[in-house]
Amino acid sequence: MGKPLFVGIAVHKPRYMATLPGVLEANDRICAWAARRNYDVVQIDDRKAPVTVNRIRKLLTPNREDEPDPSVLLDRDRIVVYFCGHGISAWPDQYWILSPGPNQSRDRISANAFRDVLASYDPLQIAFISDACRSPGTLSGTGDPVLDRLEGSSRNPQKDIFYSCREGTSSFAMPATGSEPAYLIFSSVLMRALSAPDGANIDPLLTQLNRQAVTSQSLSDYLEGNVPAAALGVDRQQAPQCDPGFRPLNHIYEEFSFSHAHDQESDVDNATFSNGSADLPDFSDGASGEGGDDREQSERTVFADIAAYLRKQYRSKEEDRIKRGQAERFELSRSEWRAPLVTLIAEELYKASPERSSIAIVGSRRPNILFQGPRHAKARRLLSTDAPGSRVDFFTLGNISRRFGDTACLRYGGRSLSLVPIFADMHVVASVENLEHEQGIEFLSWVSVYGDRREDRVLHSAEALKGLSQGYLRSTDAKKIAGLVRYAKHLDPMMGIVAAYLYNGVGDIDNVRRMAYYYTTRGQPIPFDIAMLAGLELIPSDNGFSVEVPAVPRALEQDQGAPNFTQVATPDASGNVAGLAPVLRMGWPYLRESRHPFHKSCWKFIDHLAPSPVTTFTGRFPVKYIAAAFRGD
C-alpha cells in the first residue's frame, strides 16, 4: 500500500469562544513529526483562513470534474487524524468546533462519524487523536462526518482512539509565561512520548527483541500515566481516555535507535507493569544472534510467547479494573422512577390493550400519531394509572407485521415531532420532557404486550439510555449491555441500540454487525440505529429498508469473561430494518450524505434537532414539513 496519511487540524480562534494558546504550535510539532516518519501530511489551521467542514472536505477529496476525488485517502495502510481546539461532549461522540463557532451544526465535526466514514476508504488502520474538551453543552442540531461515504467497502480497520480527557471533563491549554511558550498539556506529553526513549514509553515486548519502539499500547499506557502528573504540575486535573486497537506487528508509531538510549530495563518494567512483581521471564533464547529468515521467524516466535505471557497478566488486571468501574457506572445509570414508571404503565396497557401493540406517551400536551400513506390516525385515549402528576395518553395500534414492524410519527405540544419504530407484540412507552419552548422525548422503552416483569435485570432499558446519554456508561460496558438484549421471545430494541452506540464509541463494527445478525435469527426487524452503525447499505423497500448483513469472523482475541455471542463467527444474513431514521439524536451525523428523500427532508431542518436523547424535531414549520414528507404528501 501507499504511504500512511496524517491529517492535522488546529482551530485556535472559533467565533464566540475563547482563543486557545498553544494550539497552532502543537499542530505544527506533530505534523513535523509525521513528516519525519514518512507520512503524507495534510495540515489545516486557522492562521490565514477559517477552518470549515467544506475546506477540510476539499483538501481530502478535492473536486475533479465536479466529483470528489478520493485518491488522497485511498491505498493507505494507516490514516491518523489529530485535532486540537475546542470540543463539546455528545457522548459517546465528541464534536470538534471549527471556525464558525459552536452553534453551527454544519460546521462542527462528529468525531465518530468522521472516523467511520474514513473507514469506507479502506485503510488497514485508523487513529484518532483528540486534544479538546469533552465537557457537556446544550446543543441543537448535530455534527458533520465531513466526507461522503465511499460505497462498496465493508472492511473493519483496526482503530486507535486517544482522547485528551475523560467524558464530561476539560482539556487544558497553558498560556505563555516568561520564557516558557504556550502549550497543550496532553499534546506536550504526546510529543514527549514520540520524541525520545525514556523507558516508560517503550513497548516491553519489543525490548525483548532489542527494539526500542513506541507502540499503540505503550503510547496509551504512557499517556494515561503521565498526562495526569503533567496537569497536576500546573494545578490542573486532566486524565486522558485511551482505547488502543492496533495489533502487532503493525502497531508502531515511533522507533528509536540504541544510540538514543541509556539503560532503561528497570524503568520499562516498573512503568508498564506497576504491580511491582512483574518480572518478565527470559524469552530471548538466541533470537538476536540468528540471521536472515531464521532470525525473523525466531523473533515472531519469541514475540508470540512474550505476548501470551503479558496478555494474560494484563487481562487479569484489566478485568478487575473494568468490573470495579462498571459497578459504579451502572449505579449512576439507575433511576428511582424510570423503571417503575415503565412497569406501571406496561401493567395498565396489558389491561387496556391486551395482546395488541400500543403507544403510551407520558407527560405530553395534545399528542397524536401519524402513519405513512393514507392511513387514518388512531384515536387517543387516556390511560388510568397511579403515575403521580403525569398525564398518560395511549393509542392502540392495528396488526403489526412481525417481519417489518412499522413506524409511527408522534406529534405533541404542537411544535415537536419524533419517529418511533413499532414492533409486533410490543408496547412503546415514551416519556416526554419540557425543553425551553417545546417538548422532547426523554426516553423510550419497548415492553412485551404480555407484561414487563424483569425486576432482576442489572439495568432497565430506560436506565441504560440514561447511562448512555448522560455519559455514565463506557465502551467497556457494551458487552454487558449486549448480554441484556435477550428479552422473553424478543430482543430488546433499546438495549441493542445502547450497546451499538457503546461499541461504536471505539469503532467496534464487528460486534454491531453480530447484533444485527442476531435480530435476523429471531425474525425481528433490525433497529435502524444498529443497521446504520453497522455500516450496512440501507436498501429502500415498500416497508422502509432492508439490509444485507455481512459475515463476521471469530474475534482474534478471545475474552473468557465476555458473552460468547460477542466473539463467535456469524454468517451473512438478510433482514428488514425497523424505523426510517435514528431513534437517538446522536445517530444523525451518519445520515448527512443519505440520498433518501425523507432523510434529506429531515436534514434540511437539522438545526431544529432538539437536545433530548431521542430524536425530536421542533418548530412549527419544520414539524409540519417533516410530517408531510413522512406521510408522502
Image: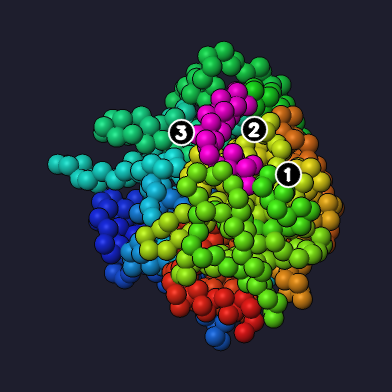
Q: Position of residue 492 (x, y in %)?
A: 71, 48
Give yes or no for contact between labels 2 and 3 (Cβ–Cβ under 8 Å). no
Give yes or no for contact between labels 1 and 2 (Cβ–Cβ under 8 Å). no
In space, the residues marked 1 and 3 are separated at their CA atoms by 46 Å
In space, the residues marked 1 and 2 are separated at their CA atoms by 18 Å
Q: Is residue 40 shown to the viewer in this render?
A: no
Q: Residue at label 1?
A: 451
Q: Which residue is rendered at x = 57% and y = 76% of the image? A: 627
Q: Residue at label 2?
A: 458
Crowding at dot 3, Cα within 10 Å, few <14 / some 14-19 / many 20+, comes out as many
Q: Is residue 562 shown to the viewer in this render?
A: yes
Q: Which residue is rendered at x = 62% and y = 61% of the image? A: 381
Amino acid at the residue labelled 1? Gly
Query: Does residue 91 lie above or below 50 as drawn?
Result: above
Amino acid at the residue labelled 3? Glu
Which of 69/430 is in front? 430
Q: Secondary structure at mark 3?
A: helix
Extreme residue in the bottom direction: 65
Query: Does residue 19 lie above or below 492 as drawn?
Result: below
Q: Which residue is rendered at x = 48% and y = 62% of the image? A: 365
Drawn side of residue 186 relative to residue 71, left or right: left
* Residue 453 occupies quadrant: top right
Q: Secondary structure at mark 1?
A: loop
Mark earlier in primary sequence (1, 2): 1
Whether residue 336 is in magenta: the answer is yes
Q: Residue at label 3?
A: 224
Magenta span:
317-345
